[in-house]
Image (cartoon, rainbow, N blue to C red):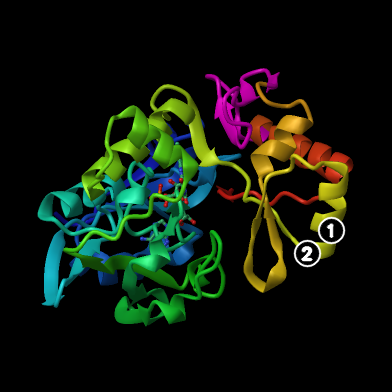
């Protein structure tokens, strides 16, 4: 189907926070062959343009004044095999969890710890999604992109060229607005290499009576843990963790730990220390806090939730209040994870 443009579109169904913002213009990209026509279209050229996947890492604080493009490119294919390894390509618009489940069903392992993360395959490298000891960069071979400044010409970035970091990549920085992810290639394995180090996974497997886990068992355990801890966006609007876990230098970490010996902390790169943002927020007495319909989740303080009619501006004000409280009590700056527009 050719591109269809709509005006004044309600974005509520397109963002998991359920924010009532409208897009001046909207279209869905189902077919990569339509990209040159899209890039030449006056609505695109006029801008601004927002490339949208599942809208699960986005806080809309106002109506979007330009063109929102929902990336809906579909398809999963096996590109090749190399010993036990399989090279698999998934198009950007594929649902992430659907892809993980498809891979498991084929006996392609490696993504099971990332089960049930909302959103699309195309957004997975943008913030290098991660959970339960695995990040997408651990299994990602390369990212197929379209150059937006060159009529959609294809460009493939290697894993190293994506410059992945903790919830970070080139797509959030230099390549933002310049490269569209059209597909992601993964190196998966027919041989299971289980990551069960996370205490929660161990506990869940025990509760499930599993002592010789398969990748499918890990996936099921991760799904069960996530369902018990995280609010379902279909029921309670949210964008997952609203803040990144802050990474501080060793000296600041030591000083904080002297005052707060319970503070959960993990070694990070270059001798730095990652702190649990949820714990910091909880210690400020904000778990379950509510200002109208904008709230801090009562089970996981890292998640901000829309109890119904919160506006994006209210949610943003709550985020700033949380940042202010944590900064005042601990001297630690919290950085938001979602794109705030
Ligand atoms: C309940 C819940 C739990 C979550 N848990 C986790 C978790 O455990 N770990 C984690 O890392 N994240 C988590 N998230 C955040 C979110 O699911 C991920 O960031 C996900 O990758 C976002 O995908 P999306 O398709 O919804 O992206 P969107 O929100 O649509 O977009 C996010 C950003 O990516 C850009 N983008 C989207 N598609 C493309 C593309 N094809 N090319 C270039 N840029 C693109 C957008 O412009 C935007 O800047 C969670 C969110 C929710 C709601």
Asked if residue 293 is among those painted magenta in the image, a careful observer would answer yes
> Can you give x and y, in whole percent of width and height, for residue 284 in the image?
79, 31
Residue 331 visible, this angle:
no
Q: Residues within 10 Å of mark 1 (few under 14, many from 20)?
A: some
Q: Nearer the viewer, residue 144 or 177?
A: 144
Say the numbered circle drawn on residue 186.
none
Question: Does 286 sit left or right of 83 as displayed?
Answer: right
Q: Nearer the viewer, residue 118 or 277?
A: 277
Asked if residue 310 is among those painted magenta in the image, a careful observer would answer yes
The quarter holding residue 41 reads bottom left
Q: Which residue is mark 1?
A: 252
Real-space Cα separation, disc 2 to disc 1, in angstroms: 6 Å
Q: Is mark 1 within 8 Å of ligand 1?
A: no
Which secondary structure lies at badge 2? Answer: loop
Q: Residue at x 53, y 49 (%)?
A: 65
Which span is picked out in magenta?
289-313
Q: Which residue is mark 2?
A: 249
Q: Nearer the viewer, residue 196 or 77?
A: 196
Q: Residue at x 36, y 50 (%)?
A: 114
Q: Residue at x 16, y 71 (%)?
A: 84
Question: Does 69 sit left or right of 78 as displayed?
Answer: right
Position of 272 relative to 337 (above/below): below
> Can you give x and y, in whole percent of width and height, for residue 289 in the image?
70, 22
Which secondary structure lies at badge 1? Answer: helix
Position of 46 relative to 286 (above/below): below
Q: Nearer the viewer, residue 110 or 118?
A: 110
Q: State if disc 1 and disc 2 touch (CB < 8 Å).
A: yes
């Amino acid at each position: 189907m050719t591109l269809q443009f709509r005006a004044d579109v309600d974005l509520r169904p397109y963002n998991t926070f359920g924010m009532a913002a409208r897009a001046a213009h909207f279209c869905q990209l189902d077919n990569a062959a339509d990209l040159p026509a899209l890039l030449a279209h006056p609505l695109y050229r006029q801008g601004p343009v927002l490339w949208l996947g599942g809208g699960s890492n986005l806080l809309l604080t106002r109506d979007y004044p330009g063109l929102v493009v929902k990336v809906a490119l579909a398809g999963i294919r096996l590109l090749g095999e190399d010993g036990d390894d399989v090279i698999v390509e998934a198009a950007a618009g594929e649902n992430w969890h659907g892809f993980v489940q498809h891979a498991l069903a084929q006996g392609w392992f490696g993504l099971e710890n990332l089960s049930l993360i909302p959103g699309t395959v195309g957004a997975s490298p943008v913030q290098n999604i991660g959970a339960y000891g695995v990040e997408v960069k651990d299994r990602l071979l390369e990212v197929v992109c379209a150059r937006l400044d060159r009529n959609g010409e294809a460009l493939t970035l290697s894993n190293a060229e994506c410059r992945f970091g903790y919830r970070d990549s080139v797509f959030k920085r230099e390549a933002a607005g310049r490269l569209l992810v059209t597909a992601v290639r993964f190196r998966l394995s027919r041989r299971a290499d289980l990551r069960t180090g996370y205490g929660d996974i161990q506990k869940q497997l025990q509760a499930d009576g599993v002592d010789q886990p398969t990748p499918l068992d890990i996936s099921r355990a991760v799904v069960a843990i996530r369902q018990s801890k995280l609010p379902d966006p279909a029921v309670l609007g949210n964008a997952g963790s609203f803040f990144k876990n802050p990474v501080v230098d060793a000296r600041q970490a030591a000083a904080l730990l002297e005052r707060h010996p319970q503070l959960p902390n993990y070694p990070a790169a270059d001798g730095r220390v990652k702190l649990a943002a949820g714990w910091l927020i909880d210690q400020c007495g904000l778990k379950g806090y509510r200002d109208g319909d904008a709230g801090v989740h009562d089970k996981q303080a890292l998640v901000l939730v829309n109890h119904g009619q919160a506006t994006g501006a209210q949610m943003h004000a709550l985020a700033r209040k949380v940042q202010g409280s944590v900064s005042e009590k601990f001297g630690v700056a919290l950085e938001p994870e979602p794109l705030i527009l």
